[in-house]
Structure formats: C-alpha cells, structure tokens
Image (spheres, rainbow, N blue to C red):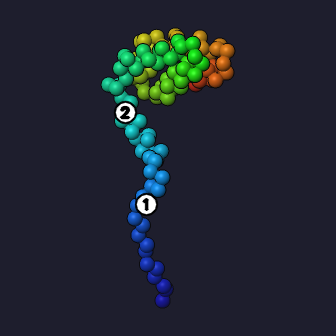
Amino acid sequence: MGKVKNKKYKSKQVNPVGLPTVKEMEFELDEFVTPENIDAGFIESVKEKLLSARVEERECGAVIIANLASNKEFVSSLINKKIIKIASPLLVDKNVAVRHAVAGCLR
C-alpha cells in the first residue's frame, strides 16, 4: 500500500515590507486614469512641463504622456489640445534624456 501525504494548507502571508505589490499598483492606476479624471487642467500642466526651460520638467512631461498613451481617450484629448505639436520639436532637443523621452511618448 502507498503512503498518503497530508496536504499543507498555506495561509496568505502578510507583506513584511508593507509596500503595495506591482499588481495592486497597476490596479489602482487603472482605476485612477479614466477619461473623467483626465481634465483640461491636467493636460495644461503637461503642456507647461513640455514648454518649460528646465530639462527635468520637459523630460517629466514626455514621460507622463508616454505612460498614459495606452488610453485612447487620453490620446484623442492630446491631439485636440495640440500637445503632440508641442512635443514633436523636442525630438531635436540638446539633452539626450529629453529626446529619448519624447521619442517614447510619440511612439
């Protein structure tokens, strides 16, 4: 006769670090970014970042656009507000990081 092994039931472990997991963060981001939440003020702040004289702000604005580009409503509002027309000349910016960020957001 064969031996039977008892099954060990695992309980859900508590997160020892206390930081949210990647899945939780993605879920919260998906809930947060909806067409209703993307208002004109947000788009204007991104526009100001792209037009800024500071390199970090231009790069940050391009990264924000790149991260939200998967939302079709957001892309259509960017086209309507002519943000793409503002971002495209940054492809020839002096700073390499800005060029890469703008290429990523326009891709």
Q: Which mark is residue 63?
A: none
Amino acid under disc 1: Gln
Please state which of residues 71 and 67 is positioned toward the viewer in this rendering.
67
Placement of the C terminus among the 4 image quadrants? top right
Could you tell me which secondary element the residue under label 1 belongs to? Answer: loop
Residue at horizontal 44 percent and vertical 21 percent from the top:
75
Which residue appears farthest toward the left when viewing the image? 36
Residue furthest toward the bottom? 1
Badge 1 vs badge 2, beta-carbon distance below 8 Å: no
Residue type at mark 2: give it.
Phe
- Rendered residue at 57%/13% (across/down): 53
Q: Which residue is mark 2?
A: 32
- What is the tally of numbered marks visible in this picture? 2
Position in image of residue 59 (x %, y %):
57, 22
Query: Residue 73 sits in which quadrant?
Result: top left
Looking at the image, residue 51 lies above or below residue 59: above
Q: Residue at x 51, y 21 (%)?
A: 61
Few, some or many residues within 10 Å of mark 2 (<14, 14–19, 20+)? few
State the image coordinates of residue 8 (x, y, percent, origin top left). 43, 72
> From the viewer's perspective, is 60 left or right of 8?
right
Residue on which disc 1 sits: 13
Whether residue 76 is visible = no
